[in-house]
Image (cartoon, helix red, strand yellow):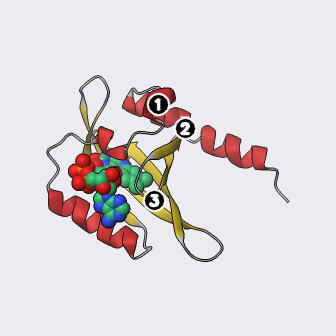
Amino acid sequence: PLPPRLFFEAVEQSPLAISITDARATILYANRAFETLTGYDRTEVLGRNESILSNRATPESIYRHLWRTLEQRQPWTGTLVNRTKGGEDYLAELTIAPVLDRSGALRYFLGMHRDVTKVH
Ligand code: FAD
């Protein structure tokens, strides 16, 4: 079997900004690219909600759809306007995947995003 260390290093070194949260979007882990893209040191975001990345202008209906999808244990993909720690807005293409435990209960979320501001 593949060693857990390999899983860790692969996620840690991914060019996608990756985070793992609990079922309420509280950040439990963030990788290096997450720090680079968002400007937050991971020690600052652990224990905080992913909503710290929101630019506070995204229509509530988008978040409602996001959570409705996740509650049904389906992955959600969309584009949000996020704000870095330094106050700069960027277009985030985000996929959130539910992580279930062995009994099928929703335990964690895996968030993966990249800056698509300059993609056209
Ligand atoms: P609200 O959405 O009003 O929510 C208030 C609180 O309830 C928050 O803790 C929220 O997370 C939680 N919540 C709301 N609905 C549910 C539900 N149905 N089940 C469980 N908890 C619920 N948002 C961004 O703007 N940018 C991101 O990059 C981003 N990345 C995310 C990555 C992951 C892995 C997850 C799970 C969520 C992410 N979110 C992101 C969504 C974020 O958690 C907030 O829901 C969103 O930012 C709206 O913030 P709000 O302050 O309006 O909180």
Q: Nearer the viewer, mark 3 or mark 1?
A: 3
Task: Compare residues 79 and 118 and report the one nearer the observer.
Answer: 79
Q: Which image quarter is the N terminus in?
A: bottom right
Looking at the rendered structure, which numbered label has been put on residue 35?
A: 1
Within 10 angstroms of label 2, few (less than 14), some, or many (20 or more) residues?
many
Most foreground residue, 94 or 70:
70
Q: Residue 60, relative to residue 32: is it above or below?
A: below
Residue 31: mark: 2
Q: Alpha-carbon neighbours of circle 1 within 10 Å: few (<14), some, or many (≥20)?
A: some
Query: In the rendered image of this protein, does residue 53 appear above or below residue 64?
Result: above
Q: Is residue 77 visible?
A: no
The amino acid type, in three-letter code, at marker 1 is: Glu
How packed is label 3: few (under 14 Cα within 10 Å), some, or many (20 or more)? some
Cα separation between marks 3 and 2:
19 Å
Residue 29 image position (x, y, % from top left):
54, 42
The percent position of residue 11, horizontal first and vertical second, equals: 62, 45
Q: Which mark is residue 23?
A: 3
Distance from mark 3 CB to nearest ligand 1 atom below 8 Å: yes
